Each structure stands twice: as structure tokens, then as C-alpha cells.
Image (cartoon, helix red, strand yellow):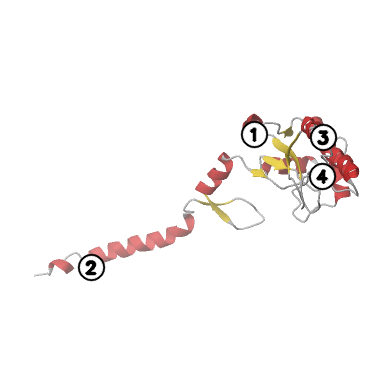
């Protein structure tokens, strides 16, 4: 009489279990376990949960001149691309912005200048370049002026541009705060590397 503990280990049962295990091992390469390779340039895989989290969330790059070039773009080339009409962007570059997964670019930079007047002028130029880009490509870009715009940009599929600067040296007077607000600036770092009327960098 077989012991109860070994009664289930007949040759037939062992073969069945072996075939079942072998089938699982053979099938494993075809099961992605919810992992997906998204980009041709890398074999990195992402879970469905991570992908859904990013696609359903509002994604903002809070320190990014409008460039997907991770090596950085010289200021002259950057301004040339933005230009007065933004015609320096190719159709592929515009599509790259749409496909980037970034909903809003906060275009903050430090504009600089030998004094506050020069800083104000260079800041106005920088902001104006982006306003021109947005107005010449309303089907692609949208300026973020309010919290409601953050909801809109996620729904309409446009690329949001949040105008900001990495310094507040361009605010020579209180009136300048209103001036730049009317130009679309919504974020201003109080100080950067240098001293200004607000504080030390």
C-alpha cells in the first residue's frame, strides 16, 4: 500500500507535470509580462502602469528652453530657429515635440546683460520671440497663461509654452512686473547667479 504522501507521485503524474513545466519554459519568451519597448534607440522596457501614468498625467518640463537637443543649442542657433516666425523648425522637429510626451515646456533661461536695462531688453526679446513662435504656429503651440490652460493643453494635444525667466533682474520697477505679465510671463525665479534689487543669487 502506498504512503499517502507519495500517492500523488505516479509516473503518469510526474510526466504530466514535466510536460506542463516544459511548455511554460518554451512559452516564456512570448510573454511580455506587461513590458513594452517604446523607442527604437534603446532596448529599455516600460510597464503598462508606467506608460499609462505618463500618458494620463500632465507632464511639465520646468527648466527647458524649447529644445529637444539634450546636448544643448547655442543661443544664436536657438534664436535663429525660433526667429520672428518660427520657420526654423522642420515638420519633423514639430512632430518630435508632439511625440515627446511633454505637455508643457517652461522656457526659463537667464537672459543676462551688463546692467538692468540690458537685462530688461534681452528679456523682452526672449519673451517676444516665443510669443511670435506661438502666434505663427497656433495649431502646434499654446501659451500657458492660467491654470485652465493646463487643462486645455492636455486635451487639445498642443505643445504648451510656459513663459518664465531664471532671474528677476529685468524688474527695474513694480510696473515692470505688470509689463512682463501682460507679455505672458507667469514664472520668475527671484534671483539666479547675480545680485538684483530683490536679493543675492
- Closer to the chain start, of discs 2 and 3, is 2
Residue farthest left in this picture: 1
Above-or-below relation of 48 to 124 = below
Task: In the rendered structure, find residue 11 and report the number of the disc placed on it.
Answer: 2
The residue indicated by pointer 1 is 150
Element at label 1: helix
Element at label 2: helix
Q: Quadrant of residue 105?
A: top right
Q: Disc 2 versus disc 1: distance between alpha carbons?
A: 66 Å
Q: Nearer the viewer, mark 3 or mark 1?
A: 3
The residue indicated by pointer 4 is 169
Observer-nearest of 150 and 139: 150
Observer-nearest of 44 and 152: 152
CB contact under 8 Å: marks 2 and 3: no
The residue indicated by pointer 3 is 176
Q: Nearer the viewer, mark 1 or mark 4?
A: 4
Q: Position of residue 159 (x, y in %)?
A: 70, 37
Above-or-below relation of 164 to 46 = above
Q: Disc 3 versus disc 1: distance between alpha carbons?
A: 25 Å
Q: Quadrant of residue 134?
A: top right
CB contact under 8 Å: marks 4 and 3: no
Q: Position of residue 25 (x, y in %)?
A: 41, 62
Q: Disc 4 versus disc 3: distance between alpha carbons?
A: 10 Å
Residue 80: tell me if it is visible.
no
Please report the residue visible at 84 percent of the width from the left and 35 percent of the height from the top: 128
Element at label 3: helix
Image quadrant for the N terminus? bottom left
Residue 35 horizontal side relative to residue 81, left or right: left
- Closer to the chain start, of discs 4 and 2, is 2
- Closer to the chain start, of discs 3 and 1, is 1
Please report the residue visible at 74 percent of the width from the left and 45 percent of the height from the top: 190
Amino acid at each position: 500500500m502506498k504512503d499517502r504522501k507519495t500517492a500523488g507521485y505516479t509516473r503518469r503524474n510526474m510526466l504530466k507535470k514535466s510536460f506542463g513545466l516544459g511548455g511554460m519554459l518554451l512559452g516564456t519568451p512570448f510573454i511580455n509580462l506587461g513590458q513594452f519597448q517604446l523607442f527604437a534607440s534603446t532596448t529599455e522596457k516600460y510597464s503598462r502602469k508606467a506608460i499609462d501614468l505618463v500618458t494620463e498625467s500632465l507632464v511639465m518640463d520646468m527648466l527647458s528652453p524649447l529644445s529637444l537637443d539634450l546636448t544643448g543649442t547655442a543661443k544664436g542657433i536657438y534664436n535663429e530657429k525660433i526667429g520672428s516666425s518660427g520657420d526654423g523648425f522642420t515638420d519633423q522637429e514639430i512632430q518630435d515635440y508632439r511625440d515627446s510626451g511633454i505637455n508643457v515646456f517652461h522656457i526659463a533661461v537667464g537672459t543676462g546683460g551688463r546692467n538692468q536695462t540690458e537685462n530688461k531688453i534681452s528679456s523682452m526679446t526672449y519673451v517676444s520671440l516665443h510669443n511670435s513662435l506661438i502666434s505663427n504656429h497656433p495649431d502646434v503651440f499654446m501659451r500657458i497663461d492660467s491654470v485652465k490652460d493646463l487643462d486645455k493643453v492636455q486635451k487639445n494635444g498642443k505643445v504648451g509654452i510656459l513663459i518664465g525667466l531664471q532671474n528677476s533682474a529685468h524688474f527695474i520697477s513694480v510696473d515692470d512686473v505688470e509689463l512682463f505679465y501682460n507679455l505672458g510671463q507667469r514664472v520668475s525665479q527671484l534671483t539666479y547667479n547675480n545680485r538684483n534689487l530683490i536679493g543675492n543669487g
